[in-house]
Image (cartoon, rainbow, N blue to C red):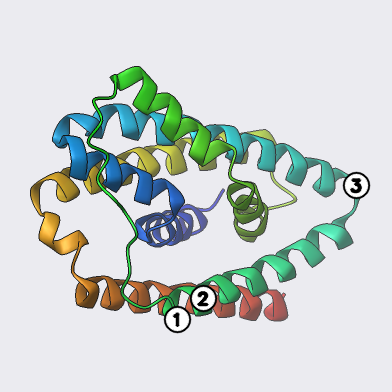
Amino acid sequence: MAVETWAAFVAASAILLIIPGPTILLVVSYALGQGWRTALPMAVGVALGDFTAMTLSMLGIGALLMASATVFTVLKWLGAAYLVYLGIKLFRAGGTLEAKPRTDATPPLKMMAHAWLVTALNPKSITFFVAFLPQFIDRHGAFLTQMLIFETTFLALAFANAFGYALVASRARQFVRNPRAIRVFNRAGGTLLVGAGLATAAMRSGN
C-alpha cells in the first residue's frame, strides 16, 4: 500500500469521524449528564462497534472483489455518489445537535455496551463503510493486509474522536449547545464530504 493512499485514508476518516452522528450524539448525551468519566467506556464501546461494522463491511467488499472487478468498480462509483449525498445532507442540517443529558447513573460496562450496540447495529454504519472503504482499496494488492491496516487506523481514530468528544462535552457544554457553532461545523463538514466524493469520482474518471 502506498503511503499516499494511507495518508488520504487518515485524512478522510478524520473528517468523517468528527462529523456528529448517532454514535457521537450518544457520547455527548452521556458526557453532558455524567461528566468526563464517561469518556473511556464510551470510546471503547464506539471502537468495538466500529470494529464490528467495519469487519462485516470489509468481508462483504472482499467477496465482491473476488467475484467481479466490474461490480467492484461500480461500487466505487456508488460510494463516491453516496459521499456527495451525505455531504449535501449534512450541509443542510442546520445548527441542531439533539443530545439530551443522560443523568441516570450508568455503570461503565453498560455504557460501553450501549455505545457498541448503537455503533455496530446501525445499518447506516455498514452502508457507510461499504461506500467509503472501496475508495482506498487496491484490488491488485493483498486484501487482508489492507483490511488490517485500514481497520487498525480507523479504530484508533474512532477511539480518539469519541474520547475527545466526551471530554469537550463535559468541559465545554456551551459549545455543543451553540446552534451557530454547530451550523458552521455541519457546513464545513458537509463541504469537505462533497469535495471528497467529487475527488473520488474524478479519480475514477482518470483511471
Amino acid type of the residue tagged 2 in the rendering? Lys
Marker count (numbered): 3
Q: Residues within 10 Å of mark 1 (few under 14, many from 20)?
A: few
N-term mark: 3 or 1? 3
Q: Can residue 90 be seen here? A: yes
Q: Which residue is mark 2?
A: 89
User: Mark 1 to mark 2: distance in Å?
Assistant: 5 Å
User: Would residue 2 appear left or right of 145 to someone viewing this image?
Assistant: left
User: Mark 2 to mark 3: distance in Å?
Assistant: 33 Å
Q: Residue at x 68, y 36 (%)?
A: 56
Q: Which residue is mark 1?
A: 92
Q: Can residue 142 be seen here? A: no
> In the image shown, does 91 or 135 lie closer to the viewer?
91
State the residue lying farthest toward the right.
67
Q: Which residue is mark 3?
A: 67
N-term mark: 2 or 3? 3
103 vs 109: above or below: below
User: Would residue 159 appear left or right of 92 to someone viewing this image?
Assistant: left
> In the image shown, does 164 or 177 lie closer to the viewer?
177
Please say if the residues under marks 2 and 3 sit with CB atoms less than 8 Å apart.
no
> In the image shown, does 47 or 178 lie closer to the viewer?
178
**Label 1's element?**
loop
State the residue lying farthest toward the left.
171
Corner quadrant of residue 18: bottom left
**Label 2's element?**
helix
Could you say which disc has been placed on residue 203 in the image? none
Amino acid type of the residue tagged 3 in the rendering? Ala
